[in-house]
Image (cartoon, rainbow, N blue to C red):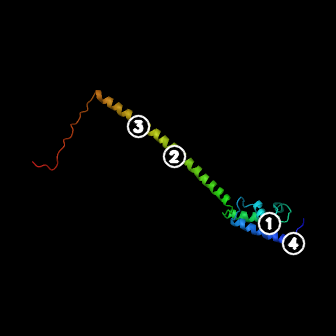
Amino acid sequence: MRISATQRTENENRIRAAMDRLLRGEIPPGGKCDIKTLASEAAVDRTAFYGTRPYAHLRTEFERRLQALQRAGEIPDPREAQISRLKTENAKLKERLTQAGQAIDDLTDFRRQALARLAAQHEEIMRLRDATTGTSHVSHLPSPRTTVIGSCS
């Protein structure tokens, strides 16, 4: 069925209005910022946007404007923005997890080395004590006397 020039103009106006709403982020419930939702919002058959159909140029314009917004860092679809934000957050968390794992490995290695050194030092102390017990030329000093300061005789 053919449509008149007036009907085509009205359809294009509805499509452009729907396009502006979607690109501003006014996404209907259950919709996305895509051609399917654009066609639904404009009450136009989706197939009219493809090939040599009458509104293919509007699909191209919509996709170009959407890509321009995305390059500028704006994502009109809140779900797409959330997905993008979550992917970025996920990558940061993975990096933090990797760093934490490396820190744990480093600290575990440090602990192992410290315990080995302490054990070696303990063995050396015990060896030296045993060596001085039998042939002791070491004399023990008497305990220091405690003096009371401030007493007058």
Q: Are marks 1 and 2 in contact (CB under 8 Å)?
A: no
Indicate which disc, 2 or 3, sits on the residue closer to the N terminus: 2
| Residue bearing mark 3 | 118
* Mark 3 neighbour class, 10 Å CA radius: few under 14, some 14 to 19, many 20 or more: few
- Residue 109 lies, in percent from the top left, at 49, 40
| Residue bearing mark 1 | 58
Which residue appears at 81% of the width and 69% of the height? 12
- Residue 43 quadrant: bottom right
The residue positioned farthest toward the bottom in the image shown: 6
- Residue 72 lies, in percent from the top left, at 67, 64
Label 3 vs label 1: CA separation?
Answer: 77 Å
Label 1 vs label 2: CA separation?
Answer: 55 Å
Task: Indicate which disc residue 31 carries.
Answer: none
| Residue bearing mark 4 | 5
Which residue appears at 67% of the width and 58% of the height? 79
Amino acid bearing label 2: Ala
* Mark 1 neighbour class, 10 Å CA radius: few under 14, some 14 to 19, many 20 or more: some
Indicate which disc, 1 or 2, sits on the residue closer to the N terminus: 1
Amino acid bearing label 3: Leu
Q: Answer with left or right where residue 102 lies relative to residue 141.
A: right
Which residue appears at 41% of the width and 34% of the height? 120
Amino acid bearing label 1: Leu
- Residue 100 lies, in percent from the top left, at 53, 47
The residue positioned farthest toward the right in the image shown: 1
Amino acid bearing label 4: Ala
Which residue appears at 55% of the width and 48% of the height? 99
Q: Is residue 121 above or below residue 12?
A: above
Q: Secondary structure at mark 3?
A: helix
Q: Answer with left or right where residue 18 lies relative to residue 150.
A: right
